[in-house]
Image: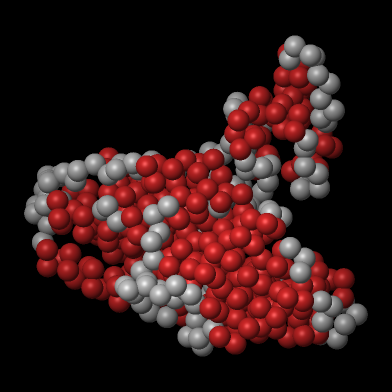
């Protein structure tokens, strides 16, 4: 599992080898160089408060930090703190020359267990990637890359077996992850060294995108967010090369979901907006609008959140002549109800939130175990906010059991996040034992 993500300010500072004192000195120098000769008020304690999320720097201080890190002032105004801060791991751009390098980078990230301090693409990088996807037209596929002709029968088999592996229940897919990785490596080798027609090339790029997307979800469930992001970047690059806008929409939706999960909702808004420009099916639009509502709620943007929730509900009620794409075919009234409830929790409307979460859990099919575990944790948090601590412990325990059974480490971590609120209720029966379970949970 990746290390816990540290604050982007600490990450940007450490990339440059600057201790906090060095950052303070550079801020003071930058302030003195301005025509008005500003006094910064920045010292080591204030830097520590920023990096530990105790305080948000004011606009003038943010602009000064932008000068120190070489970030344009318009980026500071475009994205809220701390999402404009620079990062090291930039996405691979779209375009035919980048398809195989993106896949190779993703495979290296999947095997890499080194410790990292900041593990996801930043808001500016994701926004740029989403804009490329929305605006660029893929180049013509090359007809040959040298080597032997690609056997169409092999591609048929890879497509068939990959589809079967991706359709397995969550509890089984975690045991077949190495098979998925092997299929992705085979497709990458065929793209890199094979000779194929334009039509076969499109099939290979589409299969690479689907496999990279599925492998990314497995890494995401493991809590390996850096590897997941690299795989989704590779998926987007290859979906673009395959001219598959629908699959590209799915990948952008997954990037956004990861950002929301990691408490970086500001990184999700632009990719979701770009994805919506190319989403035609009502189920797809409903899911994208619902995720954007979640981002707005986390940012405290109540009016925008309610606008998107209403639009998501209307889209889900719209009848379509064609079935929903596979990536959003599971979208249902249960998902709308529970995520709407989570939005209201973020906005402080606990009573209505609890009713919606309970309604969604009743509607959710039994087969969707991972989703049920996530939703039950939402329910436990709503119970805690309502003061029903014993019931919250019961529901949280059920969610923890489920997350451990299906091997979803990120869901285990989600339940562990209940601990700080539970510690205030140690005197309530069962809380101490559950806190101990959370402490040792893996």
**Image location of residue 33, percent across then percent down:** 73, 13
State the quadrant of the C terminus: bottom right
Kindly identify the residue that appears in the image at 66 percent across and 78 percent down: 356
Residue 396 vs residue 13, the one in the foreground: 396
**Image location of residue 134, percent across then percent down:** 39, 46
> Is any part of residue 280 visible from this angle?
yes
**Image location of residue 319, percent across then percent down:** 40, 75
Q: How many marks can you see?
A: 0
> Is any part of residue 417 visible from this angle?
no
* Above or below, 146 relative to 61: below
**Image location of residue 323, percent across then percent down:** 34, 74
Residue 439 vs residue 301, the one in the foreground: 301
Q: Is residue 218 left or right of residue 395?
A: left
* Above or below, 361 relative to 48: below
* Above or below, 399 relative to 70: below
Kindly identify the residue that appears in the image at 23 percent across and 73 percent down: 160
State the quadrant of the N terminus: bottom right
**Residue positioned most to the right:** 427
Kindly identify the residue that appears in the image at 65 percent across and 78 percent down: 357
């Amino acid at each position: 599992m990746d290390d816990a993500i540290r604050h982007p300010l600490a990450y940007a500072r450490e990339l440059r080898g600057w201790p906090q004192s060095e950052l303070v000195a550079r801020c003071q120098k930058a302030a003195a160089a301005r025509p008005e000769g500003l006094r910064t008020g920045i010292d080591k304690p204030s830097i520590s408060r920023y990096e530990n999320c105790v305080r948000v720097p004011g606009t003038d201080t943010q602009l000064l930090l932008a000068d120190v890190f070489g970030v344009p002032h318009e980026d500071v105004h475009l994205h809220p703190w701390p999402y404009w801060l620079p990062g090291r791991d930039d996405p691979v751009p779209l375009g035919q020359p980048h398809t195989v390098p993106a896949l190779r980078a993703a495979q290296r990230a999947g095997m890499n267990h080194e410790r990292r301090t900041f593990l996801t693409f930043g808001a500016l990088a994701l926004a740029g990637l989403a804009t490329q996807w929305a605006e660029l037209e893929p180049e013509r596929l090359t007809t040959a890359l040298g080597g032997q002709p690609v056997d169409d029968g092999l591609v048929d088999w890879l497509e068939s077996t990959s589809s079967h592996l991706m359709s397995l229940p969550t509890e089984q897919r975690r045991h077949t992850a190495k098979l998925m990785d092997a299929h992705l490596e085979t497709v990458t080798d065929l793209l890199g060294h094979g000779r194929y027609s334009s039509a076969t090339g499109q099939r290979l790029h589409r299969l690479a995108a689907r496999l990279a997307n599925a492998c990314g979800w497995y890494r995401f469930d493991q809590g390996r967010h850096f590897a997941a992001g690299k795989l989704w970047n590779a998926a987007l690059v290859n979906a673009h090369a395959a001219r598959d806008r629908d699959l590209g929409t799915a990948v952008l939706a997954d990037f956004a979901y990861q950002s929301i999960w990691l408490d970086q909702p500001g990184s999700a808004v632009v990719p979701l907006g770009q994805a919506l420009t190319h989403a035609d099916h009502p189920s797809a639009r409903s899911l994208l609008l619902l995720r954007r509502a979640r981002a707005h709620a986390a940012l405290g943007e109540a009016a925008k959140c309610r606008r998107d929730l209403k639009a998501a509900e209307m889209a889900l009620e719209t009848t379509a002549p064609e079935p929903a794409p596979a990536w959003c075919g599971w979208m249902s009234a249960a998902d709308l109800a529970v995520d709407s409830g989570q939005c209201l929790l973020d906005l402080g409307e606990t009573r209505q939130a609890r009713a919606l979460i309970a309604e969604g859990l009743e509607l959710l099919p039994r087969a969707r175990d991972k989703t049920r575990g996530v939703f039950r944790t939402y329910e436990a948090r709503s119970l805690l906010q309502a003061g029903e601590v014993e019931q919250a412990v019961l529901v949280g325990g059920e969610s923890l059991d489920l997350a451990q059974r299906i091997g979803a480490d990120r869901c285990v971590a989600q339940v562990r996040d209940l601990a700080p609120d539970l510690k205030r209720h140690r005197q309530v029966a069962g809380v101490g034992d559950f806190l101990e379970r959370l402490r040792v949970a893996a």
